[in-house]
Image (cartoon, rainbow, N blue to C red):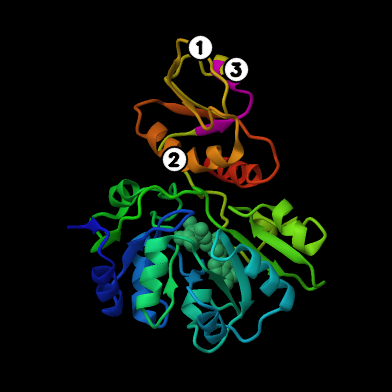
């Protein structure tokens, strides 16, 4: 069996230097022993991921955080204590336990304590942390179900630990301390800037994309569906592309037009967390629905809406 909920089997494979797909609350990860450089290199090969794009290291205890970091800023620790386990990744100065292949040569390691019962249990079985990027081919849509993982990587991996649908649905928020001792967001994600502001007292700035050489993974070609995705006013775009077979990805409203073959609501309840939960699943569905084009709209730029808009913009061309 390629997929199942056998934690012991997943642990045995990982101890053997194999790569296993694991569930998290954000998206599925493609995991390997972070202390085994050869196993980590396999991740890059399977994903077809450039080596300059560093990996997040997943842990289940502060003991492990201390082992892989050289120092822990007290404010970042306070933020971690509030949101871990959860969809937040923090850059800390790395210790020698972390091979440079994981950080792409950077002196900082990205650390996250994920919040999924199977993966927490799995990490507790292991005496090493798990390096894991999202379990998709490089540049493609991230997986939020085992079926998504199998579709892209099924031929290349031994096992998917099946934890059902990812609850949050977009990747973790990545933060760091900048040179002015201010918390900065490198990638908007499951924890919102507003929530972090409750601890920092200020809204952390988002430095994204090409402005942020520190998150080289945030390339504009990320999350690209197999067919073009355009963003804007849905009605206008539907009229402009009326000669095409269209799938519409809307926040909540309905649209009736003969060219619209497929219609997807991110959140029938008009609620941003529900929209995040459905985003990648509906993008997977839309790209496989036989249409020529996906037309989508941006959501309110607040809370987790910032992460949704970030992914939609990267998916568009
Ligand atoms: O929710 C998530 O974060 C998921 C789950 C599996 O944990 N993981 C994930 O990994 O989204 P990935 O590899 O798809 O995205 C990680 C991002 C990339 O943009 C990468 O450049 C950035 O994190 N990153 C990782 N380590 C870094 C480092 N040391 N310095 C700066 N950016 C880093
Ligand atoms: Mg990714």
Q: Residues within 10 Å of mark 2 (few under 14, many from 20)?
A: many
* Residue named by callout 2: 225
Ligand 2 under 8 Å from disc 3 Cβ: no
Residue 252, position as x, y percentages in the image: 57, 26
Q: Residue at x 53, y 27 (%)?
A: 268
Q: Is mark 2 within 8 Å of ligand 2?
A: no
Q: Residue furthest left?
A: 1
Say which mark, if any, is on residue 235. 3
Percent coordinates x, y for residue 24 in the rendering = 44, 58
Determine the residue positioned at 35% across, 66% down.
45
Q: Residue at x 63, y 77 (%)?
A: 92
- Say which residue label 1 marks: 256
- Chain part drawn in magenta: 229-238
Is 230 a magenta residue?
A: yes
Residue 203 seen from this side = yes
| Numbered disc total | 3
Estimate the spatial distance between the alpha carbons at disc 3 and disc 2, rounded to whole Å: 21 Å
Do the residues bearing badges 3 and 1 touch, measured as CB atoms within 8 Å?
no
At x 42%, y 73%, the residue is 130
Is residue 151 found left or right of 200 in the rendered image?
left
The image quarter containing residue 274 is top right
Look at the image and say whether residue 63 sits in the magenta stretch: no
Tag 3: Cα neighbours inside 10 Å, few (<14), some, or many (≥20)? some
C-alpha gap between disc 3 and disc 1: 10 Å
Query: Alpha-carbon neighbours of circle 1 within 10 Å: few (<14), some, or many (≥20)?
Result: few
Quarter of the picture containing the C terminus is top right
């Amino acid at each position: 069996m390629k997929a199942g909920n056998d934690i012991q089997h997943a642990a045995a494979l990982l101890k053997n230097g194999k790569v296993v797909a694991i569930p998290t609350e954000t998206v599925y990860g493609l995991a390997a022993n972070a202390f085994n450089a050869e196993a980590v290199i396999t991740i890059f090969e399977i994903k077809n991921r450039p080596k300059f794009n560093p990996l997040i290291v997943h842990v289940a205890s502060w003991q492990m955080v201390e082992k892989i970091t050289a120092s822990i800023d007290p404010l970042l620790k306070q933020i971690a204590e509030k949101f871990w386990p959860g969809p937040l990744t923090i850059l800390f100065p790395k210790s020698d336990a972390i091979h440079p292949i994981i950080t792409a040569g950077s002196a900082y390691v990205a650390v996250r304590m994920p919040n999924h019962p199977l993966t927490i249990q799995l990490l507790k079985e292991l005496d090493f942390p798990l390096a894991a990027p999202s379990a998709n081919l490089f540049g493609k849509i991230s997986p939020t179900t085992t079926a998504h993982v199998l579709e892209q990587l099924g031929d290349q991996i031994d096992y998917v630990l099946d934890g059902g649908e990812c609850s949050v649905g977009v990747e973790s928020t990545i933060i760091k301390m900048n040179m002015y001792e201010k918390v900065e967001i490198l990638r908007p994600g499951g924890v919102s800037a507003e929530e972090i502001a409750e601890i920092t007292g200020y809204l952390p700035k988002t430095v994204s994309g090409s402005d942020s050489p520190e998150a080289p993974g945030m390339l504009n070609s990320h999350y690209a569906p197999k067919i073009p995705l355009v963003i804007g006013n849905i009605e206008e775009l539907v009229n402009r592309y009326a000669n095409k077979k269209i799938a519409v990805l809307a926040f909540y409203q309905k649209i009736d037009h003969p060219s619209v073959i497929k219609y997807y609501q991110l959140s029938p309840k008009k609620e941003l967390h529900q929209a995040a939960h459905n985003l990648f699943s509906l993008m997977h569905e839309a790209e496989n629905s036989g249409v020529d084009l996906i037309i989508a709209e941006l959501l309110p730029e607040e809370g987790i809406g910032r992460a949704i808009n970030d992914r939609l913009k990267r998916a568009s061309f």
